[in-house]
Amino acid sequence: MTKPLNIGMIGYGFMGRAHSNAYNRVSDFFDTEYTPVLKAACARNAENVQAFADNWGYESIETDWRKLIARDDIDAIDICVPNNLHKEMAIACAEAGKIILCEKPLAMNSEEGEEMCQAVEKAGVANIVWYNYRRIPAVTLAKQLIEEGKLGRIFHYRANFLQDWTISDDLPQGGAALWRLDAAAAGSGVTGDLLAHCIDTAIWLNGGVSNVSAMTETFIKERKHNLTGKVEPVTIDDACAFLCHFSNGSLGLFESTRYARGHKALYTLEINGEHGSLKWDLHDLHRLDYFDHRDEGRVRGWRSIHVTDGDHPYMDKWWVPGLQIGYEHSFVHQVADFLESLSTGKPAGPTFRDALETQRICDAVLASAESGQWTDVG
Ligand SMILES: NC(=O)c1ccc[n+]([C@@H]2O[C@H](COP(=O)([O-])OP(=O)(O)OC[C@H]3O[C@@H](n4cnc5c(N)ncnc54)[C@H](O)[C@@H]3O)[C@@H](O)[C@H]2O)c1
């Protein structure tokens, strides 16, 4: 018999759906002591949240997140709302003794993030942040190969996250669908939204970052604001590029924009070491490219590993060797690892504290872009 873990979901948008799917699927494929039960979904609009609850199988709804958190029949709260709401909700959850799964970025800035860390640590509640790309099997395989020392000393790390959906100057900012274009709701633009993912993966694979030198640009300076109806200054970074030093002595190069025509979600990373290199591309997420200089010279070259075999991370749980999985499965894996951590008592990363490190790097990137100076990560 498995034990129920009663979930209260806040938000029914993109991530509300991705996570609900993961809770529903996880116990079909992974043997875990706990099984998620979709107890209640919460958002402000009762009709919309009821439709969401019916679609995904939630037993009940709430329209006030404080009432959801106060419910005794909820064990864990999943925070899937815009970034400016994370702190207040997470601290209230911690004070109520709830387990917390919070979307990324952890907070609007590292001061808020530190308060959230202190709240979960004081309450002693299990917590995790949804940096889900760690759990794409090809990325997890990269982590294994690096930890085994296959690349040797690391010299370079580079990552891009490129999209093209904000190029039109007719696109408004703010409000329900476009809160990402409003720094008051998002905290920042591509830095917190896209580069935060690249940074989380980078520090997981290659260790901490000591300092950064960044530039940002806001290409379209004014847009109509959906909440006020007025044309207002755009407050987010549309594009960001930064250089950094990792603590292990390697150099990093990161770039993100929503103005790269033709790219929808092109997250790529590459890491170069003394013996070999690894490359990964979200548009082709089941492949990991690997070059090993120690191979015999005549057959040496880049190999493209189809990460679908039973001895690849997570893949023994799915279908048969050779058949692919996709984006949604990274969330299933995160839930599976989190449930496992509740059984073992060994935290599954990234915890709030781990995600605070990403937040600190984002803060340093934005400060460096502002000052034009190399900036230490606080
Ligand atoms: N891990 C990832 O890859 C990933 C991808 C997308 C978004 N995110 C993060 O997930 C979070 C949500 O993003 P999204 O794309 O799902 O947004 P979304 O706009 O699709 O959905 C946001 C939801 O929040 C709800 N909401 C807003 N204010 C609320 C309130 N006061 N009380 C209750 N509900 C409220 C809205 O009704 C909506 O259902 C953000 O922090 C974002 O950065 C992470």
Image (spheres, rainbow, N blue to C red):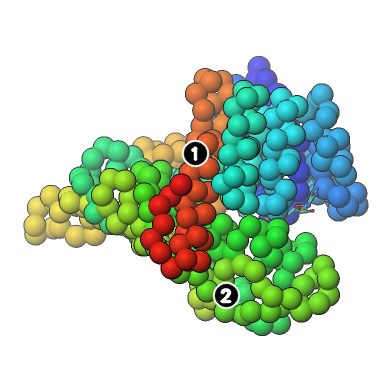
Q: Position of residue 249 (x, y in %)?
A: 26, 49
Identified at 52% across, 74% down, the residue is 217
Count of numbered labels shown in the rendering:
2
Q: Is mark 2 on a helix, strand or loop?
A: loop
Q: Where is residue 76 in the image (x, y as percent from the top left)?
A: 70, 31
Residue 354, labelled with which disc? Answer: 1
Amino acid at dot 2: Thr
Q: Is mark 1 on a helix, strand or loop?
A: helix
Q: Nearer the viewer, residue 184 or 202?
A: 184
Residue 218, labelled with which disc? Answer: 2
Is residue 16 among the parts visible in the rendering? no
Q: Is residue 92 above or below residue 257?
A: above
Q: Is residue 114 above or below residue 122?
A: below
Tell whether 3 sits left or right of 298: right
Mark 2 Cβ and ligand 1 under 8 Å apart: no
Residue 175, labelled with which disc? Answer: none
Q: Position of residue 365 (x, y in %)?
A: 47, 59
- For disc 2, the neighbor class at 10 Å (few under 14, some 14 to 19, many from 20) is some
Q: Which image quarter holds the N terminus?
A: top right
Nearest to viewer (mark 2 / mark 1): 2
Q: Which residue lies furthest to the right in this view?
A: 47
Q: Is residue 279 above or below residue 103?
A: below
Distance in Å between CA atoms under marks 2 and 1: 29 Å
Identified at 41% across, 57% down, the residue is 375
Q: Position of residue 149 (x, y in %)?
A: 23, 40
Q: Could you say which quadrant of the image residue 242 lies in?
A: bottom left
Q: Which of 126 and 220 is in front in this view?
A: 220
For marks 2 and 1, the one nearer the N-term is: 2
Identified at 41% across, 43% down, the residue is 204
